[in-house]
């Protein structure tokens, strides 16, 4: 019985991690919004920045240091997460060009922890 529980637990952990494992595969390269704007339809992208605005159903505005781009995020991918415009995220998806519009169809979102540099850590410890 214990062996079955361990196997089921391991399987569940693997299935939960699978989207992240797939999204970080060789098909994805972290690029900027400016670079993403130059890519062809269906190109796989990984962007790191901020989801700053909920535009409408399943549409969000993403920003990095080079500009903004629309994201289409299905409810199952969004998974009722809180939108925090100060949270750094990495989104994985595909470029979608239709007529004159451009967006990224998001397959996975990962929150990125910001690592403070030593000076910031020292300043926090002083206060």
Image (tube, helix red, strand yellow):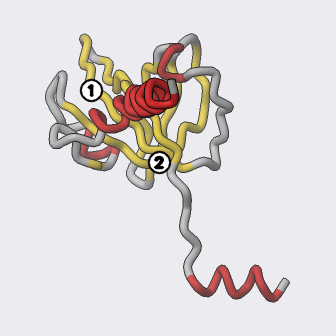
- Residues at discs 1 and 2 in contact (Cβ within 8 Å): no
**Number of numbered markers:** 2
Which disc number belongs to residue 56?
A: none
Eyeballing the image, is 63 above or below 17?
A: below
Eyeballing the image, is 96 above or below 28?
A: above
The residue sitting at 63% across, 28% down in the picture is: 81
Eyeballing the image, is 1 above or below 91?
A: above
Numbered disc 1: secondary structure: strand
**Mark 2 highlights which residue?**
49
Mark 1 and mark 2: Cα distance apart in space? 16 Å
Q: Quadrant of residue 125?
A: bottom right
- Relative to 55, 12 lies left or right: left
Q: Residue 62: x and y, percent?
A: 48, 37
Q: Residue 75: x and y, percent?
A: 53, 14
Quadrant that contains the C terminus: bottom right
Considering only order in the chain, which callout, 2 or 1, is on the residue closer to the N terminus? Answer: 2
Q: Residues within 10 Å of mark 1 (few under 14, many from 20)?
A: many
The residue sitting at 16% across, 37% down in the picture is: 27
**Residue 108 in sight in this render:** no
Numbered disc 2: secondary structure: strand
**Mark 1 highlights which residue?**
94
């Amino acid at each position: 019985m214990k062996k079955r529980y361990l196997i089921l637990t391991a399987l569940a952990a693997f299935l939960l991690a699978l989207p992240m494992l797939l999204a970080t595969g060789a098909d994805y390269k972290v690029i900027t919004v400016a670079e993403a704007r130059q890519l062809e339809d269906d190109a796989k992208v990984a962007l790191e920045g901020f989801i700053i605005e909920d535009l409408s159903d399943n549409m969000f505005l993403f920003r990095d240091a080079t500009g903004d781009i629309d994201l289409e995020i299905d409810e199952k991918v969004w998974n009722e997460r809180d939108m925090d415009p100060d949270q750094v995220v990495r989104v994985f998806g595909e470029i979608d060009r239709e007529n004159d519009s451009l967006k990224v169809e998001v397959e996975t979102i990962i929150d990125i922890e910001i690592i403070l540099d030593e000076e910031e850590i020292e300043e926090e410890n002083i206060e």
